[in-house]
Image (spheres, rainbow, N blue to C red):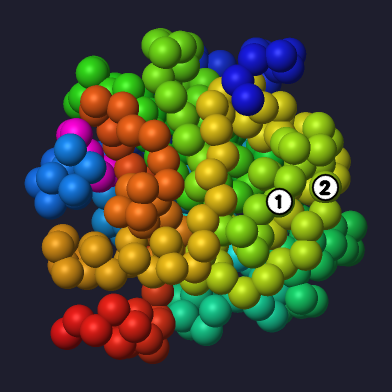
Amino acid sequence: MSGGVYVDQSSVSLRDIWKAKKRIAPYIQQSPLIYSERLSEIANCAIYLKLENLHASGSFKIRGATNKILLLTEEERKLGVTTFSTGNFGVSVAMIAKQLGIRATVCISERVPQTKVAALRRSGVQLEIYGQSQDDAAARCEQLQKSKGLTILHPFDDPEVIAGQGTIGLEIIEELPEVDTIFGGLSGGGLHSGIGVAMKTIDPSINIIGLSPTSSAAMYESIKAGKPLLVEEQDTYADSLLGGIGLNNKLTFPLVQKYVDDIILLEEEDITAGMHFMLIHHRMAIEGAAACGIGAIINKKVKLGTHNVIMITGNSVGSEVLFDIMQAHHSW
């Protein structure tokens, strides 16, 4: 998958990511990178967890949202912003916009879980629920841009957002220079694009693996077809990975083509196995998208390196989902 596609490196560079790291530092704490003894025993190699679920916003997306918003002009700040989201980017935008005194409107589809809807309502953001897919929510954003002059903050296909997400890669290399393989849930590609530019510019031998649910694998299907495709959204425990990549995708599609070495499709039982593992062995409730790497390792779906890092990307999961998972795995 890596190679064969030319990407304009001026779109997102390693320098952009270093600048983003400095820019967002007053607002974002560095997330812990911990060694998972039990998972390492299972895999027979070193497994580390990058705990992005511990951000105040609950996910890694606060990085990209913060970097983007800090680069807005005074006029853009004055008029306000809007974004579309499966939940986590919306919460992140709401949090940093409130901190900076910027009005924000978040558009979501009716498929977004109530846990995330409740979090958005608590944030005080203007919330619009529209349509049955992320693409529908994106269309509503465009309407708001035209009618109110709001600036659209794209949740993944934006150079400043990608640079913000790429700061994760810099932190990992600083703490674990011997890292050779990275795993994480893949949807729109902002995370993998950012860490791809950051880590492979420093060391091209690092393997970057994307993990997607079979029920919603827009990037996987698009890469396979050689162009962005519309993929119907279906229910999945990894609901943060729902949504298309956009037929007019300019950045993350070619960046994923260039930097991601493989995309592995997972079944729902792989995802719930990862969520269950984190509850039992690390006492953390994480969302399905964040559990993909763990489930893939437990169920032997991926080829491992010597020093592996799993990106634990978010914690937005409802108690009813956790109850179902504990029942399914017969563990209390």
Whether residues under marks 1 and 2 lie with C-beta atoms below 8 angstroms apart, the answer is yes
Residue 146 x %, y %: 89, 57
* Of the pair 151 and 44, the residue shown nearer to us: 44
- Taking 220 as reference, is 164 above or below it? above
Picture quadrant where residue 325 is located:
bottom left
The quadrant the C terminus occupies is bottom left
Q: Which residue is at the far front? A: 300
Report the residue at 64% width, 64% height from top.
215
Residue 7 x %, y %: 71, 17
For the residue labelled by badge 1, is the local secondary structure a helix, a strand or a loop?
Answer: helix
The quadrant the N terminus occupies is top right
Q: Is residue 93 magenta?
A: no
Picture quadrant where residue 103 is located:
bottom right
| Tag of residue 218 | 1
The amino acid sitting under disc 2 is Leu
Residue 45 x %, y %: 19, 34
10 Å crowding of disc 1: few (<14), some (14-19), many (20+)? many
Magenta-highlighted stretch: main secondary structure?
strand
For the residue labelled by badge 2, is the local secondary structure a helix, a strand or a loop?
Answer: loop
The amino acid sitting under disc 1 is Ala
Report the residue at 60% width, 50% height from top.
187
Q: Earlier in the sequence, mark 1 or mark 2?
A: 1
- The part of the chain drawn in magenta is 45-50
Q: Viewed as shown, does residue 100 lie left or right of 299?
A: right
Q: Label 2, on which residue? A: 229
Residue 276 appears in the picture as rendered: yes
Residue 113 x %, y %: 54, 79
Q: Viewed as shown, does residue 41 lie left or right of 225?
A: left
Q: Viewed as shown, does residue 221 lie left or right of 36?
A: right
